[in-house]
Image (cartoon, rainbow, N blue to C red):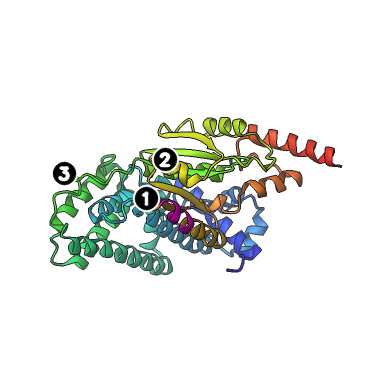
Amino acid sequence: MPRPTNRAERRTQIANALLEVMAERGYERSSVAEVARRAGLNHGLLHYHFKSKHEILLAALEELTTRHEARLEVVLGSAPDDPVEQVRIFLDFHLGLGAAADPTALACWVAIGGEALKQPDVQARYAASLEATTGRLLEIIENGIKSGQFRCPEPAAAASALVAVIQGYFVLAATSRELIPRGSAAESAMKMAEGLLGTDSVIEGHQREPRPCAVYAGTFDPFTKGHLSVVEAAARLFDRVIVLVAVNPDKDPVFTAEERLAAIESETKHLPNVSCASTEGYVVEYARDHGASHLVRGLRDATDATQETLLAQLNRQLAPEVRTLFIPADPEFAEVSSTRLKELVLGGADVSGLCSPDVADQLARRLVLNKEVAG
């Protein structure tokens, strides 16, 4: 897959900036000047890529749809063979406050839904996104019918009705948010789902298959905010996550294993179900020996996907009981890697936004010192 052009990257950067501002202020109060500031661009450069705020909105909708579909598949992947749990996840993802929810994305959908009622071209693209969302829910419902978990004579009608409930809440949130008691939307939708799907287990009486432990391994030299975003996503999906520093005695890392462990502990202290460890052995064997059901791997691009798929297949041969779960990188960290971070530091760039300030400072000091010694 060819790399995106600089123009495409800039347009995505601007679209993401509008999403960020819109989540805080809504669309009407999102000024072009503030979008330019969040994107780190001057006003003229922004207008070089987009003629109007409306054009940015269309690009933002496309970006939000892409992210929405990718993240939905990630959270649904936590219950791949359980349609009941997937319906619960689907509704919480769109309406809830639980682990599957993304409050920032929900705020953007509410804002864009309001604009779709007023602007025909926004409405057309919004409708296409709704069609895809309804189709995905229909697929889950049909799987539930096949497995005997749902007794639903009209699955297409049920899927449409539940998506209509989601959209109704979006409209209500955009116009009269005070009418929705906090945390009630997802639970109410789940109660409706029970009636539509002919089951009483969307809310009560259903226990998902335990997913006790996952291992997220890497050299983490250094640990970046891209790594942290993967850990945070895994912590929402598993009861316990071990961040594993893979130690290679034949390599000369910038940070010792002990320093990397300390950095990870500091960066993940807000996640009570995350711990860290190190190993010089095979990662998949460590995972198996410590009772992990999954290895977690972050994906930044198509190249990562190809390499990680091959590695997952090899690990499956070594330990068939340990599966691999891929988590796509957050868009703002899609180009961030430990190697890239070092290149940026050697080039004099400020990387404090890509890793912790302490790690950024230590990395700069050590790389400059190593360069001077080598020189």
Q: Which of the two discs, 3 and 2, labels the residue nearer the N terminus? A: 3
Identified at 62% across, 31% down, the residue is: 259
Give the Cα separation between the discs numbered 1 and 3.
Answer: 28 Å
Q: Amino acid at mark 1?
A: Glu
Identified at 16% across, 44% down, the residue is: 205
Q: Amino acid at mark 3?
A: Gly
Residue under label 2, please give it. 289
Secondary structure category for the residue under label 3: loop
Q: Which of the two discs, 2 and 1, labels the residue nearer the N terminus? A: 2
In the displayed orientation, state which residue is furthest to the right: 375
Q: Position of residue 59 (x, y in %)?
A: 51, 63
Q: Which label number is shown at residue 7?
A: none
What residue range appears in magenta? 313-319
Secondary structure category for the residue under label 1: loop
Residue under label 1, please give it. 321
* For discs 1 and 3, the disc positioned in front in the rendered view: 1
Badge 3: residue crowd in 10 Å (few <14, some 14–19, many ≥20): few
Quarter assignment of residue 369: top right
